[in-house]
Amino acid sequence: MSTYKLGSNITFDFTTHNPATGNVSDADVLPTCEIFQDITDTSLIVLTVVKRTAKTGDYRVTIPATAANGFAVGNSYNVIATAIVNGVTAKARIGVFILDSVSGQDLAATLGTPVALDSGAATLAGMLTKMADNNGGADFNAGSDSLHSLEGVVTPMKIEVDNMNFVLLPDIKDTVDTIDADLPGIQSVLNEVLDYLENKLVINVATSEWWLYDAAGTTVVKKWPLKDKNGGNITVAVGAVSERGKRIL
């Protein structure tokens, strides 16, 4: 059974034969056709049969399968031809079809053109096979290969914000806990560094520089020019006092 899109013009051919010899022969009069929807026993519409030009016993009928003509998606249709040849009347079903809202061409246009994956067939079936596994589907295991199973394999990282309450993956949480535990030690080291700088870092007015002394406080180990926030040099006046009480030479 063929499937056509609602609104299509569907054409069927049929031939007539001499009942005595079986040879192809024109009908005594132009044959007729009827079309029946599902179990309805009256023809849905009147059909016009046309004899193909210069073809003995060859006829065609075109069916305008539109909603305006009473056709609908999901229904099946039988096309019955009636012909009289040499005074003998005969009937035959010349076509049967169902209607859908889309055609095969529409579906193909939507899906696009299949491509060959990893030397597989350039068909939808070939693509699905390669996506399932690399052995023609023979190695596919629904328990481990399905998308549903992958959801359980890949542990999601959930960050739920509720009054600043974060639920993290165990390894990340352990890292955060470790850093938190080390903070007192880190703070102690920072305090020592600040104490050292407080006592060993001074401003030299004569040169407008920062001078950093060694631990003994006798030897300058590093000098930096004083800079403002824009990177320009600063000249310190004699007798100036640091805003924060920094020693000034």
Image: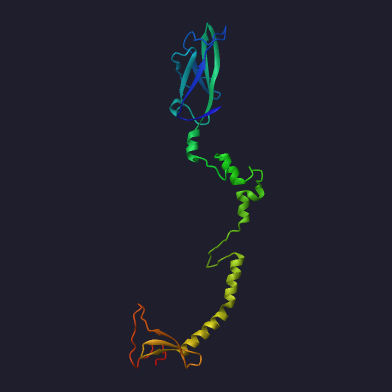
Q: Nearer the viewer, residue 181 or 54?
A: 54
Q: Is residue 216 above or below residue 193?
A: below
Give the residue at x 49% y 15%.
Answer: 58
Residue 170's image quarter?
Answer: bottom right
Residue 82, image x and y in percent? 52, 14
Picture coordinates of residue 182, whole percent (x, y):
58, 77
Residue 29 appears in view: yes
The location of residue 106, given as percent across then percent down, is 47, 36
Numbered marks: total: 0
Question: How has the structure been colored for display?
Answer: rainbow
| x, y percent for residue 25 | 51, 10
- Foreground of the two, 92 or 212: 212
Specify the quadrant that holds the C terminus: bottom left
Q: Residue at x 60, y 56 (%)?
A: 154
Q: Where does the N terminus fall, quadrant-wise?
A: top right
**Can the viewer see residue 101 in this picture?**
no
Vertical arrangement, residue 75 with respect to residue 248, above or below: above
- Residue at (47%, 38%) from the top-left corner? 109
Q: Measured along the vertical axis of the image, is residue 96 above or below residue 110?
A: above
Q: Nearer the viewer, residue 105 or 34?
A: 105
Q: Relative to residue 6, is residue 212 depicted above or below?
A: below
